[in-house]
Image (cartoon, rainbow, N blue to C red):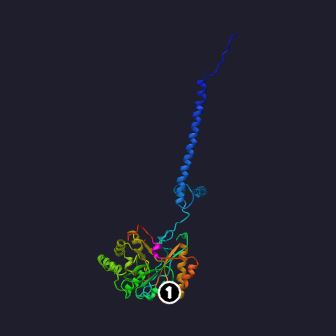
């Protein structure tokens, strides 16, 4: 009987139908999906990294970006970076966002030239700026101050640096300051009657010492022996600065005594601060003038620097000192750190003895100024009163 032949598709054709176009389409789909996944992961990592550098998580960044799409215009979206919703407070600089470390948008009264306390031995005076740079800390801000140095407070306890100026006339003042039981930065005049004895005592105690460098004021007051003056040549300024520093051995920094005239002169301050840079010393701008360029020139030269925020005893009455001390604490709480300058007056010492323990009980941490420096560059080896 006739045999019916079955018309089967050849094996090679069947395999081609299975392994050809359908398989190639399947592989293409897999490659496409893999590419999408890799691209999404890369975008997440890039944008997430930028967001984390701004202080937020990647997830938060994407949520904020999505939420803002409808509210922003196209030009705004094109120019937008990761949201700057958090501000980092630098130590030393201790400072605040929008101002150098060690500075603040707060203002304080500027006493007129010639008011009580403007002469030698009186208090340095305040300028219209406050807080560390910060500053500078910042010292301050400070940072403060730097800096310093307007912004959110740094994590951790608020830090306070107390500087006591005009030392070098009495050893007894050191004993009273030591009884406060907190770190203090001691600013010693270089050519006073007991400067060598005061410096030796502070070095035995391993205290932080500043050379309290006398500078010419606008008021015509006497800044004391060894003062730097506006009419000096650069070489005279260098020699006088070196002589003052050498008279306070062990000093780790310098702050100005009076100096409302000289501290406003960028050329003179460049010469003086160049000496500090060579010696590896830091500079604390006492800010006896609103026109002071000391902090700015110091940071430009790479000298670690800070600025003070509060003068405690322009008015030496205990109630006035106590009010300024509270303002110091408020600035420290708001910005993370603040620097105050005071003097070894009986009213100041008595007020500090009463107020410091209360501040410690509230969680404030007392530190030396060097803990709040604005470091614009690596430290070299070993940041109106009419005064």
Q: Position of residue 241 (x, y in %)?
A: 34, 78
Q: Is 369 within the magenta?
A: yes
Q: Where is residue 149 in the image (x, y as percent from the top left)?
A: 48, 71
Please give left or right for residue 299 compared with residue 63 in the image: left
In the depicted structure, whether residue 378 falls above or below residue 341: above
Task: Report the quarter where the N terminus lies.
Answer: top right
Can residue 387 be seen at all in this image of the molecule? no
Main SS category, magenta section: helix
Front-most of residues 169 and 148 = 169
Q: Residue at x 55, y 46 (%)?
A: 38
- The magenta stretch is 368-373
Classify mark 1: helix, strand or loop: helix
In the depicted structure, whether residue 49 falls above or below residue 173: above
Find residue 9 and report its image quarter: top right
Q: Where is residue 148 in the image (x, y as percent from the top left)?
A: 47, 72
Find residue 260 and report its image quarter: bottom left
Label 1 neighbourhood size at 10 Å, few (<14), some (14-19), many (20+)? many
Q: Position of residue 20 (x, y in %)?
A: 58, 30
In the depicted structure, whether residue 336 falls above or below residue 212: above
Front-most of residues 300 and 9 = 9
In the depicted structure, whether residue 333 falls above or below residue 25: below
Number of marks: 1
Mark 1 = which residue? 349
Task: Report the quarter where the C terminus lies.
Answer: bottom left
Can residue 171 be seen at all in this image of the molecule? yes
Q: Is 248 within the magenta?
A: no
């Amino acid at each position: 009987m006739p045999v019916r032949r079955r018309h089967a598709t050849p094996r090679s054709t069947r395999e081609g139908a299975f392994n050809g176009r359908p398989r190639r389409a399947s592989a293409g789909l897999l490659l496409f999906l893999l590419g999408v996944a890799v691209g999404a992961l890369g975008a997440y990592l890039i944008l997430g990294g930028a967001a984390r550098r701004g202080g937020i998580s990647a997830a938060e960044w994407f949520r904020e970006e999505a939420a803002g799409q409808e509210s922003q215009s196209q030009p705004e979206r094109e120019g937008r970076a990761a949201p700057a919703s958090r501000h980092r407070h630098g130590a030393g600089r201790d400072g605040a966002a929008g101002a150098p470390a060690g500075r603040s948008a707060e203002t304080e009264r500027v006493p007129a030239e010639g008011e009580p306390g403007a002469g030698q031995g009186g208090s340095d005076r305040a300028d219209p700026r406050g807080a560390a740079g910060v500053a500078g800390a910042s010292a301050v801000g400070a940072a403060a101050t730097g800096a310093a140095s307007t912004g959110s407070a740094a994590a951790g306890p608020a830090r306070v640096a107390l500087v006591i100026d005009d030392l070098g006339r009495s050893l007894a003042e050191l004993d009273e300051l030591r009884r406060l039981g907190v770190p203090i930065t001691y600013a010693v005049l270089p050519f006073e009657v007991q400067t060598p004895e005061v410096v030796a005592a502070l070095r035995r105690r391993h205290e932080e010492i500043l050379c309290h460098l006398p500078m010419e004021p606008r008021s015509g007051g006497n800044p004391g022996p060894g003062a730097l003056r506006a009419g000096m040549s650069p070489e005279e300024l260098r020699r006088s600065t070196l002589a003052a520093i050498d008279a306070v051995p062990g000093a780790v920094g310098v702050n100005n005594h009076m100096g409302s005239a000289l501290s406003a002169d960028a050329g003179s301050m460049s010469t003086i601060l160049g000496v500090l840079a060579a010696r590896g010393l830091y500079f604390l701008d006492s800010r006896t003038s609103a026109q002071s360029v000391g902090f700015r020139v110091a940071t430009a030269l790479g000298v670690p620097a800070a600025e003070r925020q509060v003068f405690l005893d322009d008015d030496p009455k205990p109630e006035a000192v106590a009010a300024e001390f509270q303002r110091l604490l408020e600035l420290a709480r708001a910005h993370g750190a603040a620097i105050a300058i005071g003097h070894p007056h009986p009213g100041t010492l008595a007020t500090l003895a009463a107020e410091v323990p209360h501040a410690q009980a509230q969680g404030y941490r007392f530190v030396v100024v060097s803990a709040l420096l604005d470091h614009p560059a690596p430290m070299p080896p070993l940041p109106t009163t009419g005064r």
